[in-house]
Image (tube, helix red, strand yellow):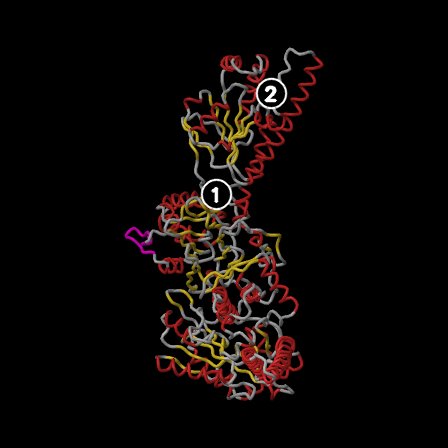
Amino acid sequence: MHEHFIRTINLPHAGLVVLVGASNSGKTTLLDMLVSEGILLKTEVVSSDHFRQLVGDTEFIDWSGLPRLESDVLFYEYQQMSAKAFEAMDTILAMRCRLNKLTVVDATHLYAEDRQKYVQLAAKAHVPVMALVLDVPESVLLERDSGRAHPRGRQRVKQQTQLLKRNLRGIREEGFDACYVLKDVEKVNFARCAQPLFHDMGAGIDIIGDIHGCYREMLEVIERLGYMEDTEGLYHHPEGRRLVSVGDVMSRGPESLLAVQFWKKHVDAGLAYMIDSNHGWKIGRYLDGRKVTLNHGDERFAEEMVQYEQKAGKVAAEQLRGELRDFLLHAPSHLIFGRNGLRHVVVTHAGIKDHFIGKQSARISDYCRYGDTEGQDADGKPIRKDWFVDHESGEIVVWGHDPRPQPTLVNQTVNIDQGVVFGGMLTAYRYPEKEFVSVPAHENYANDPDSPLVRWQRKRFSPPNLRKLIAGYSVLTESYGEVRVQGESVKTAIDTVSHVTVPMEELVYIPPTMSPAPKVSEEEGYLEHPREALAYYRSQGVQTMVAEKKHMGSRAILLLFKNEQAAVEYVGYPTLGTIYTRSGRPFFESGFGKQVLEKLNADLVDAGYFEQHQTDFVLLDAEIVPWNLKARELIAAQYAHVGEAALLDRSKLVDKLKQAKVAGREVGDWLEEMERKYGNAVTFQEAFQKYCWDVDGLDEIRIAPFHTLAHSGQTFFDQSHIWHMEHNRELAGLSSIFMETEYRVITDETSEEEVIRWWNEMTEDGHEGIVIKPERFLMKNRDKMIQPAIKVRGRKYLHIIYGMDYLAPENLKRLKQRRTNKKERHALMEGALGMEGVERFVRKDTVERIHECVLAALSLESEPIDPRL
């Protein structure tokens, strides 16, 4: 705290400004001037007089000249009113400090205890507090008092003047961040500080994770981001983007000194920003000559400084020490980037609480350096708490400090420390693009057998922390970008996973929903037709398509291991695998399911499948028939009963109408209508019965794979659907349970017409229809993912979806108004989540990371969408 006699006073952007001065010293006049000049908002000023009016209807009670009894009563009333006024005012001040607002307090504040409560309040809220002391001569105060409507009185003014003089010297020691003593306000200019932690993001920012002296990898990622070096060794982006470091640019790695010098040089040039961090803070204090213990790789920096002094000399080394010391010790705890004054991104090192954002204090700096911890484990490692589960304020918080194998996005927070110094990756996060750019480490520089990445692998199979997810969360997928799911949907999905799904270690992929074509058929008498699906893909620039026969069965995922021991590396315990539905439930009852798994395992092992493909497992997306194997209750309750009742009722009515017609009644039109409806009931009944048969054993079921999703170490999302069909043909030749799926390739108008003829013949014979897919599993148009598949169902089959009379002109006209937008959007998001989850499973990510994708897909499935689509 210090006293300034200067012409300009900069008021803080937020916090408290406490006016100190006797009555009539001009406090209110000064504030009125600052408001009129636009330096303060009217709402940023609170006064004790105003709060006395709010609680007591008057700002002053004059008891002078009254009898003793009356004056005592009025004095007590004034004291009570003032106490309540200050109590209310203090509540408002605390709220405004919590919200990081500036508030100027207009009161005399002549007693140290009155001022001290504001110093304590500011400290508690982590905001600055300033004192403005108006030291006006007593003669001026008395002159002004004589002109007031309610004079305070000569004696009171003199008492206040003497009290201020006795306190003036002590105010400097009361803990204010700044104290200004003003004898003549007219000789002072006032200005307002901007928020020092806020920066306009301009063309964009590129945030780089913990570097830890991995200088080569740092330059590689910067160059991959598009920055180019000039003749002075400064890196510029052609679009004017700027670099941001989350801190820990030094220690553990081989070239810490070069890394720190790089960031200082670029920060000084206005090309970059760097955040304070735990290693940066320790190295800064070491350079300042303070007693610190250099460990965890910090000693390497000290060794580099010794080498620098030997090479450059003591004078140069001391100069560098001073420069780097000031740079590191003055790095901000966090920075905020946005546009038009609105916060978009907060960058911090180890974490931040929402109410710390935009504030500065020693406690906040410590929190941002070290994160939220609760002691140490048995090995002396800090036990880190998941601070990000409580993040609610909306900004994206980008952080590092806690190495993870892959970038993690939870609850609008993004971790980009991928442990480059431990042999992982160096990651950059591009904003506003929300894209990651990573480069692998050249080597494991730290060579730590118990590194964070090693510990991360050891806890792969730990159950996920549901607190991170239950309020809603985001998953960043490579193919679609960010997919966000809402809290209510997540709760429903968690309930499903908790009670009815296969074990979460085995639940690695939820197949996406599939939409019909965006447009209904223009063909008369058709709701769906292949032409619309083909037209959609042509409009997306797809030249080659694959049409696959759609089996009327139930969707299933098969995770099949080479043997039980091979499963331990992937799910944590021995098993031959699992077969589950698209909602994650076991497909078969346990006994029969075990038989199916044993049969498939024996067939694939005998055929040498796992050895031939050098894999420990195969992950398949398939259809299992007959339909009634899983849909028995649905068929009995919704289809069989309805069909039988309709056949009975309509056949009786047709018979009665025929009799009436023979009797000469005018019922011809009615009879024709009912005969048509009876035919609809027959079609309805035949439509589902075709896909139902009794199952007495393994020989009665068939599994038709259509996607081979993954083997050990690789996924097959980059393969064409022709490859998938041919691979599944291979599987059909290895086991009697597997069956081949018919397909056609579409390349031109001739092949299009052939597929349409095939579809017509197939669906008129009662089959469900076809699925049309683009050539490859994942295709994009203008960098946006297109529909991975479109189902085209036949006219007869749609009777069981839309009702047996759906083709009646009035019904079909109404149905052609359907909208598929939400279904299409979900198909894209679920497809991206599915691929992301499988990628994570193959690279042996944690159960929590895989489960983020699975739970998000199940959450989307729980949202209401027309089930007939």
Viewer-side residue, 758 vs 818:
818
Q: Marks 1 and 2: in contact by CB < 8 Å?
A: no
Viewer-side residue, 796 vs 380:
796
Q: Residue at x 59, y 31 (%)?
A: 89
Q: Residue at x 62, y 57 (%)?
A: 377
The answer to whether residue 558 is seen in the rendering is: no
The answer to whether residue 295 is seen in the rendering is: yes
Quarter occupied by residue 659: bottom right
Instruction: Pick out the residue farthest to the front.
Output: 664
Q: Secondary structure at mark 1?
A: loop
Quarter occupied by residue 663: bottom right
Q: Which mark is residue 289?
A: 1
In the image, residue 237 lies in the stretch drawn in magenta:
yes
State which tag comes first along the sequence, 2 or 1: 2
> Residue 490, how many percent across, how many down?
58, 61
Above or below residue 281? Residue 221 is: below
Chain part drawn in magenta: 227-238
What kind of residue is marked 2? Phe
Above or below residue 656? Residue 477 is: above
What kind of residue is marked 1? Gly
> Residue 805, how many percent across, how many down?
55, 75
Q: Secondary structure at mark 2?
A: loop
Magenta region's main secondary structure?
A: loop
- What is the CA distance from the residue labelled 2 to the residue labelled 1? 58 Å
Q: Is residue 57 left or right of residue 831?
A: right
Depth-wise, is mark 2 or mark 1 nearer the camera?
2
In the image, residue 295 lies in the stretch drawn in magenta:
no
Q: Is residue 258 left or right of residue 87?
A: left
Quarter occupied by residue 862: bottom right
Instruction: Pick out the residue farthest to the right.
Output: 69
Q: Which mark is residue 60?
A: 2
Tell me the crowding category of disc 2: few under 14, some 14 to 19, or many 20 or more residues within 10 angstroms, Cα based.
some
